[in-house]
Amino acid sequence: MQNREMAGIEEKVFAGERITDQEFLILAEEADFYQLAFLANGIRERLHPEKLVTYVVDRNINYTDICVSACKFCAFFKAPEDKEGYLLSHDELGEKIKETQDLGGTQILLQGGLHPDLPLEYYEDMLRFMKKTGIHIHGFSPPEIIHFASISNLSVAEVIKRLIVAGLDSIPGGGAEILSDRVRESTAPRKCNADQWIAVMEEAHIQGLRTSATMMFGHIETLEERLEHLRRLRELQDRTGGFTAFIVWPFQPDNTALIDQVKIEKTTGYSYLKMLALSRIYLDNFKNIQASWVTQGPKIAQLSLFFGANDFGSTMIEENVVAAAGVSFKLSEKEIRTLVTDAGFQPHQRLMDYTLVS
């Protein structure tokens, strides 16, 4: 019976049909490693038959590490009263943007802590300053936008509208972690809930912004809660089609408060690749899946290209949040291109919306 059931799921996947939640759980619990790779790779080949693997040249700029959220899984933030906390000046932002552009960079991934003392106008001024450089601003994750709405007493729709006018081009999928309120209340009770995260993304899509989606797994969530997360993303993509890509990566426990409270072992490359493949299979309405070399390193990232990923993510000229958890993989554009080529694919630089750079 189980073999017939598995064969039926495989037939659906090969036919390009959507799998159910129950079929996802069957795959997660019963399919072997190579079955998942075979299915996920088949989907990637169907969606991307040209053997192209894309990447973006950009830089993460964390404009402040001061944050009132105090998420238990974050090793980066500083409390508002911590004198070691920072807030980047316009001059510092300008230097980072110029260095990025000199290296062929096309965008800035702009994110920061939930600072208690900065008004919405501060972020609008920052966007206007940055936009003068001509860079694409991929900025402000849903928790930040919820925070801006709270401090300004405005609706999410009005905040997004004002940020667009000031220069915001797209929104990253940060702050999702696991879109299950049980998990969020335990690990980040001061951060936006799952419904709010989805609502920000839906409003952004309505207003014409493209966004990415993410998942951080491997801490206190259950398999069913991972599925809940993916279901919420798939349902929103059905409604709007506004997500450009999905990125999944495992929790990095070192230097976080969560590891002091719960015994958590680092997710293995095996478990990461399995979750990547399951995501590729379930998210049938997402065209692009990114490899996470920042947490997994170059060799697992290469293998990701055979477990459903078609994109190598970002060169990440600068990355601070994962590095604060003790993970510090670095790859230049040349190294990314070599890794992609050595895996048998053709590397190509892209923009945020997956338009190829000529």
Image (tube, rainbow, N blue to C red):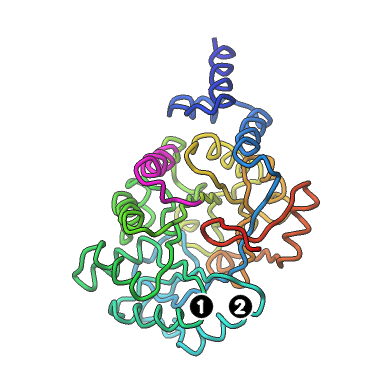
Front position in the image: 114 or 121 = 121
Q: Going 54% across and 70% down the picture, which residue do you hit?
A: 107
Q: Which residues are magenta?
A: 227-244
Q: Are marks 1 and 2 in contact (CB under 8 Å)?
A: yes
Residue neighbourhood size for the residue with mark 1, other residues' Cα within 10 Å, grouped as few (<14), some (14–19), many (≥20): few
Name which residue lies at 76% across and 63% down.
335
Query: In the image as oriented, which residue stretches furthest toward the left?
Result: 153
The percent coordinates of residue 45 (x first, y second) are: 65, 37
Q: Is residue 232 magenta?
A: yes
Q: Amino acid at mark 1?
A: Gly
Query: In the figure, 165 relative to 193: above or below?
Result: below
Q: Position of residue 31 (x, y in %)?
A: 60, 26
Mark 2 secondary-structure assignment: helix
**Residue kind at label 2, given as amino acid type:** Gln
Mark 1 secondary-structure assignment: loop
Seen in the image, is 73 located left or right of residue 13? left
User: What secondary structure prevails in the magenta region?
Assistant: helix
Task: Judge left or right: residue 220 versus residue 319.
Answer: left
Percent x, y of residue 116:
30, 76
Cα separation between marks 1 and 2: 9 Å
Q: Disc 1 designates what residue?
A: 134
> In this figure, which residue is indicated by the disc labeled 2?
101
| Residue drawn at (69%, 43%) of the image | 50
Point out the tag, 1 or 2, that comes first from the N-terminus: 2
> Compared to 98, does 222 lie above or below?
above
In the image, residue 162 lies at what x, y percent? Answer: 29, 71
Of residue 5 and residue 139, the one placed in the foreground of this image is 139
Image-quadrant location for residue 273? top right
Assign the C terminus to one quadrant of the image: bottom right
Q: Is residue 327 among what the camera can see? A: no
